[in-house]
Structures are given as C-alpha cells and as structure tokens.
Image (cartoon, rainbow, N blue to C red):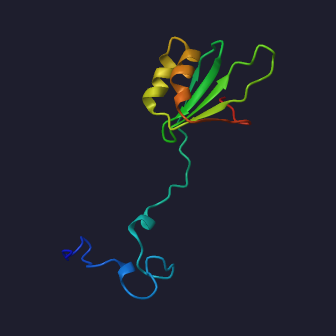
C-alpha cells in the first residue's frame, strides 16, 4: 500500500487523479504548473567576444557565453571560393579560451571544436 502524505504545497494528490478535465491542462484554470510561471527574457544579451586569428584556416571568431555559441569565420579557400562562417553549438567558456590561446587554430578546430555540433551560418558575419 502506498504511503499517503502531504506534498510541500499542502495538496494530497495530483490534479490528474481527480475525475473530470485536468485543471493542469485547462488554460482558463487559475491553477498553473510551476514551470509555466517561469519568466521569459525577451531582451537579447549582447555579450559577444571577438578574436582575430589571422591563421591560414581561421580568420576570426566571436563567442557568446550566454548562448554558448561560437561563430567561426574561415580564411578563404585557395581557389578563391569563400567558405561560409560556421556556428558551433553548446561551447563552454573554457573551450573558447582554449581556442583563443591555441598555438594552431586549425588544429584546435580539428581536435576540439569539431566534437561539438556545428552548422553553416550563411549571411552571418563575425565583424
């Protein structure tokens, strides 16, 4: 037999245990789940850090710690065809610091950054 007790909010059961429509799913109900009360920040934080590499593979990059997003601008290909910039997702601040201080930016991309999710970012600019 399950032990009955009170939850922190004083209720003894879930709303879904009561007969009838679930008040947790009713948009007109006064009762709301806790996660629905979380505020949404609509102002975009401008915390992009810029680093100029000037290497044979990486031209420049910028990083947003709040988004954990890295944007890399490549040095153009030898044939003159420009590479699109790339976004790297979920990059921790320590990886950004390591990238900026790496002896070889291209080697760091191959060994570290390519382990993160990445995607082309046409139309984006590091500058």
The C terminus - image quarter? top right
Place of residue 44 in the rendered image (x, y in percent of width and height, measured from the top left): 56, 48
Quick check: 118 above or below 18?
Answer: above
Left or right of 100 on screen, residue 60: right
Q: Residue at horizontal 46%, vertical 24%?
A: 97
Q: Quadrant of residue 76?
A: top right
Q: Residue at horizontal 68%, vertical 36%?
A: 121
Q: Quadrant of residue 54?
A: top right
Place of residue 102 in the rendered image (x, y in percent of width and height, measured from the top left): 49, 15
Place of residue 55 in the rendered image (x, y in percent of width and height, measured from the top left): 63, 13
Q: Residue at horizontal 43%, vertical 62%?
A: 38
Residue at the outermost front position: 1
Left or right of 80 on screen, residue 16: left
Quick check: 80 above or below 21?
Answer: above
Number of numbered markers = 0
Towards the viewer: 19 or 60: 19
The N terminus - image quarter? bottom left
Place of residue 57 in the rendered image (x, y in percent of width and height, measured from the top left): 65, 16
Towards the viewer: 39 or 122: 122
Left or right of 30 on screen, residue 5: left
Towards the viewer: 106 or 42: 106
């Amino acid at each position: 037999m399950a032990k009955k007790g009170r939850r922190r909010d004083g209720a003894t059961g879930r709303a879904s245990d009561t007969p009838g429509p679930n008040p947790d799913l009713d948009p007109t109900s006064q009762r709301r789940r806790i996660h629905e009360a979380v505020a949404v920040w609509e102002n975009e934080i401008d915390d992009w850090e810029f680093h100029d590499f000037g290497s044979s593979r990486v031209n420049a990059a910028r990083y947003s710690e709040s988004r954990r997003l890295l944007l890399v601008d490549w040095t153009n290909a030898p044939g003159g065809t420009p590479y699109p910039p790339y976004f790297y997702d979920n990059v921790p601040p320590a990886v950004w610091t390591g990238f900026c201080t790496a002896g070889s930016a291209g080697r760091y991309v191959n060994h570290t950054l390519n382990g993160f999710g990445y995607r082309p970012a046409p139309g984006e600019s590091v500058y």
